[in-house]
Image (cartoon, grey):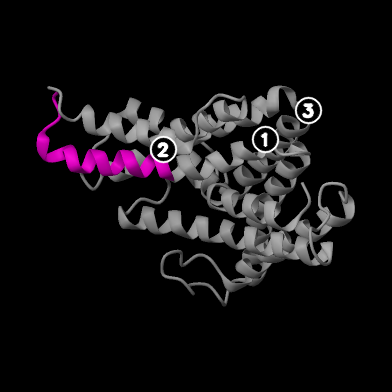
Amino acid sequence: MNKILERFLIFAIGVPLVIVIILFLPYQNYLAVTISSILLSAIGAFELANLLKIKNNYLYRFEALVLGALIPGIQALAGFGLPVNIPFALVLGLSWLLISSIVPTNLQFENVAGRIASGSTVMLYPGLLMAWLVKMTVLPHAGMVILIYAFIVISNDSLAWAFGMLFGAKNRGVLAVSPSKSIAGFIGGLLASVIVGVAAVYLLPEVFTARYGKSVLAGLILGFFSGSAAILGDLGESALKRSVHIKDSGTLIPGRGGVLDSIDSLALSAPVYYALYWLLFNQ
């Protein structure tokens, strides 16, 4: 199937699915959003572990899945009032990596350092970053907050692709890490994110009322910096793939590659969006 058609199909299916999960399944602190975040983080960590394996940094598959889900999972439990937090999750994961390395296994000891490094990496990326999406589920007006976050990232990706296709032929190759990306695409993506941020202020004033100054300026800042983080997240993952000479992190999502290819922007923009929303707007 043509890759452009595949992208359109994924967009046509994925966007309504995101809206349904966020708006129509608000039960138990948006448990559907939480479960989706944990699963995406686990699969993304699994794909990342496979990339790291190319550089001889071995991590058992079940470990990658568990470690990728660990921090967002612990954050979800904290949201339900359990006395756990992200530092607890980090201690738990690192303790497992260290202690399990000293018991007799088939693991060669020269691979221990690489295994611990890989395990620590997948806990942080995508695990720690995706935990900020889980943190959004307990905010006041969580559904609308998460929906705007999703639209800032999705619109960024979509308009960046469209602007790149329409206007990017002569301004590609600005960054060696992703030569197919264009200046036009970056401008289009940022423009889309800013529009969503400003629109949120007008359409949802009860959710996006500025703590200080003008709400429109706060919305512009929210959209611009969250959109910038989304772009940087995509470029960062491109650098990682380029370092191991791989085009896509996986093949699970037609037209996009792997799960990590699809959540790279979401992951890096989540803590930026959360922090800006908390700083700029009344809760």
Q: Residue at x 72, y 66 (%)?
A: 191
Mark 1 Cα within 10 Å, few/some/many (few <14, many 20+)?
Answer: many
Residue 154 relative to residue 131: left or right: right
Q: Mark 1 points at which residue?
A: 137
| Position in image of residue 72 (x %, y %) | 51, 34
Q: Mark 3 points at which residue?
A: 24
Q: Mark 2 points at which residue?
A: 45
Say if the magenta span includes residue 122.
yes
SS for tag 3?
A: loop
Residue placed most toward the observer, 145 or 3: 145
Mark 2 Cα within 10 Å, few/some/many (few <14, many 20+)?
Answer: many
Q: Is residue 257 visible?
A: no
Label 3 vs 2, first from the N-terminus: 3
Magenta span: 105-124
Q: How far apart are marks 3 and 2 (CA)?
A: 28 Å
Residue 103 relative to residue 51: left or right: left
